[in-house]
Each structure stands twice: as structure tokens, then as C-alpha cells.
Amino acid sequence: MYYLAIKKYLEEHDFEALSPRVVLFDMDGVLYDSMPNHAIAWQESMAKYGIHMTADDAYATEGARGVDTIREMVRRQQHREIDEAEAQKMYDLKSQTFHSLPEAPVMPGILDLMRQIHASGLQCGVVTGSGQRPLISRILKDFGDYVDEAHITTAYDVTRGKPLPDPYLMGLHKAGDLAPWQAVVIENAPLGVRSGHAARIFTIAVNTGPLPNNELLAAGANLIFSSMTDFSEHWTELNF
């Protein structure tokens, strides 16, 4: 099954080989089981600005820059345009609400997966729609054996976020100006999968949330696993 997925990817993009040198991880729902907290923070903070946001909205927009999500919600519900500065002020409240909640745990299976990737001689990078300094500091604390700050791409490294390819293209640049066929993306949400696919990188979806698998496959996932532990147990079978 894995061989066929790789073969299909190579044919789609007219690449000769898939030879990864870096694995690019999304953060929320991939490194951390944090999406339940994000859903609460989005709903509570946006309600204060008259924006109705559901838990499903939070999962569906996960991976995008927070300011982009807010500007779109305001456009849809209040029929007005706001600039990035106003959206940032609203996002700051969302961030404060998120950090007031109990700390989200590290995703089960992720550290074992990173150990295997590191042992294979591959780099680990992070590509997140967040730009909050406390979250970046936590990544370095929890995953510092495998990830350094130079290989973390945040919302502030790009002007166009997921689902456009820019975040993952920046991830390739930070990994050493690599080609798409020299990387693998690990995502959990449709917008992030679309971003990895748009960057022409082999994209693996790990369904750690409530969305059906077909939404991730429709977004362009080349492979899908049911959990990070499941993925970790099958890593060596991919033969990267």
C-alpha cells in the first residue's frame, strides 16, 4: 500500500524519486493534543466580538493563520472588512484565552516517531500557523533533542498561510533550500494537507481529530493513519 501511494505521488508530480531529508510537522493536533483547547478558546474569545464560532469551525480552519481565520469570519458574519491590525487584536484575546486553559499534553506516539526519524538521519522541522512565543518555547523544551528554532516556521515567516503552499515552501527553505521530493509533511487538518499538497510535498495525514478520513484524502493526503502511535509503529515500513 505504501509503495503504491509513493508511486502515485511521483507520477502526479513527475518526480523521479522520493528521497526525504526532512520531515515537516504541523503543531496543533500533531505535536500536541491541543485542538480541544483551541476550540474552546476560539468559541469564547470570538463570542466577545459577536462572532459565532463552533468547535467544527475551529477544526476546519486549523492550520491557517489566526488573523486570516478571523478576517474571514468577520467577512462572513458581519459583512465588513477588517485590517490585519484589528484581526491581530482579536487574535491576541484568543491567545490569552488559550493560555489560560490547562496545558495540552504531548501527542501520544510523537516522541517515539521523532526518535525514529532522527535515527534515520532525517531532520525534523515544524510548520505552524501560530506565532505565539510561549508555544515556540514549549516546542523547544519538549522536542529540543530533534528540533531547533531555525527549523520552526511560524505565521510570522509568511504573509500567506495555509492552505496556500507558502508555509511549507518556507519549511523547505529553512531545511536547506530543499526540493519538494526531499521532504515529507505530517498534518492532521484539511487546510494543512492542502498546503503540503500545494507545495508538492508527500503529505501524510494523521487523523487525530473528529473529521472523517475522506475530508483529509479529498484535501490531497497521500497516506492516512488513525493516530500518531499507529503511524510511529509503521514508520520503518515506509522505507524512506
Image (cartoon, rainbow, N blue to C red):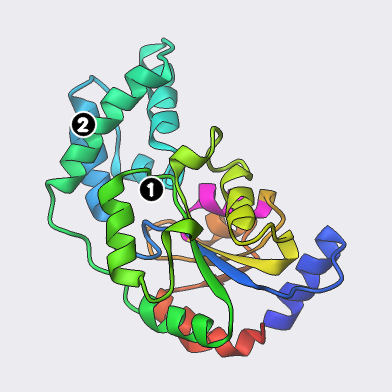
Within the image, what quadrant is residue 54 found in? top left
The magenta region covers 188-197
Q: Above or below — where is 52 with respect to 123? A: above
Using residue 47 as the reference point, say whether residue 12 is left or right of it. right
Residue 181 location in percent, x, y?
Answer: 74, 65
The residue that mark 1 highlights is 59
* Image quarter hosting the C terminus: bottom right
Residue 202 in view here: yes
Using residue 205 as the reference point, say whether residue 107 is left or right of it. left
* Label 1, label 2: how far apart the Cα atoms are: 19 Å
Q: Residue at x 60, y 69 (%)?
A: 22
Local packing at callout 1 (Cα closer than 10 Å; few below 14, some 14-19, many 20+) is many
Residue 41 location in percent, x, y?
Answer: 21, 41
Q: Main secondary structure of the magenta part?
A: helix
The one nearer the camera, 233 or 226, is 233
The residue that mark 2 highlights is 93
Residue 32 in view here: no
Q: Amino acid at mark 1?
A: Tyr
SS assignment at label 2:
helix
* Image quarter hosting the N terminus: bottom right
